[in-house]
Amino acid sequence: MKKTERQRLINANDILFSLIVRLKGKRCKKCGKYGEPKQDGMMIDGLDCSHWHGRQNMILRYDEKNADCLCSGCHRYWWHGNKTETIARKEWEKRFPERDKYLLDKLKNQPMSFKADVYWIKKQNILLKDILNTLITK
């Protein structure tokens, strides 16, 4: 099945956003492990972009306050592991109460009619590219 323009843009944005979070984070926020060099020299191999609220929440999907850099092990086993997601979320809520409040308020204040249309997704793409270019040219 062919992907729609909307889905292609979402996939491209997900890649850009993940790069941004991992480049800014440089290491796992849980255990402190640094990323390994990739072929292009970026020190992000072995790091993941972990969302506090899942990517299905489009209003938060590309919000940097909704994501952390975690190593693959912590992301899989600590955040998504067997019944530990609740434990992880509770710990994060304690460690970062202002962020948690911001995210919950943003979700609560999201208009019921919000739909991530192609125009909104393209706008996010431009913003993400600008952020990434700034990071890479530093």
Image (spheres, rainbow, N blue to C red):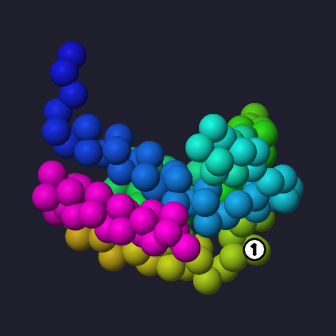
- Check residue 131 for magenta coloring: yes
- Can residue 44 be seen? no
Left or right of residue 101, residue 119 in this image: left
**Residue displayed at 80% across by 54% down:** 34
Residue topped by disc 1? 94
The answer to whether 53 is drawn above or below residue 101 in the figure is above
Q: Main secondary structure of the magenta part?
A: helix
Q: Quadrant of residue 80?
A: top right
Secondary structure type for disc 1: helix
Left or right of residue 91, residue 49 in this image: left
- Check residue 116 for magenta coloring: yes
Amino acid type at image mark 1: Lys
Where residue 30 appears, as percent x and y from the top left, is 80, 58
**Residue displayed at 61% across by 56% down:** 22
Where residue 128 appears, as percent x and y from the top left, is 37, 63
The answer to whether 74 is drawn above or below residue 22 in the figure is above
- Can residue 41 be seen? yes
Where residue 45 appears, as percent x and y from the top left, is 68, 42
Residue furthest to the top in view is 1
The residue segment tinted magenta is 113-138
Q: Quadrant of residue 98?
A: bottom right
Label total for image: 1
Residue furthest to the bottom in view is 98
Where residue 31 appears, as percent x and y from the top left, is 86, 56
Relative depth, front residue between 96 and 13:
13
Q: Quadrant of the C terminus?
A: bottom right
**Residue displayed at 36% across by 50% down:** 13
> How packed is label 1: few (under 14 Cα within 10 Å), some, or many (20 or more)?
few
Relative depth, front residue between 12 and 38:
38
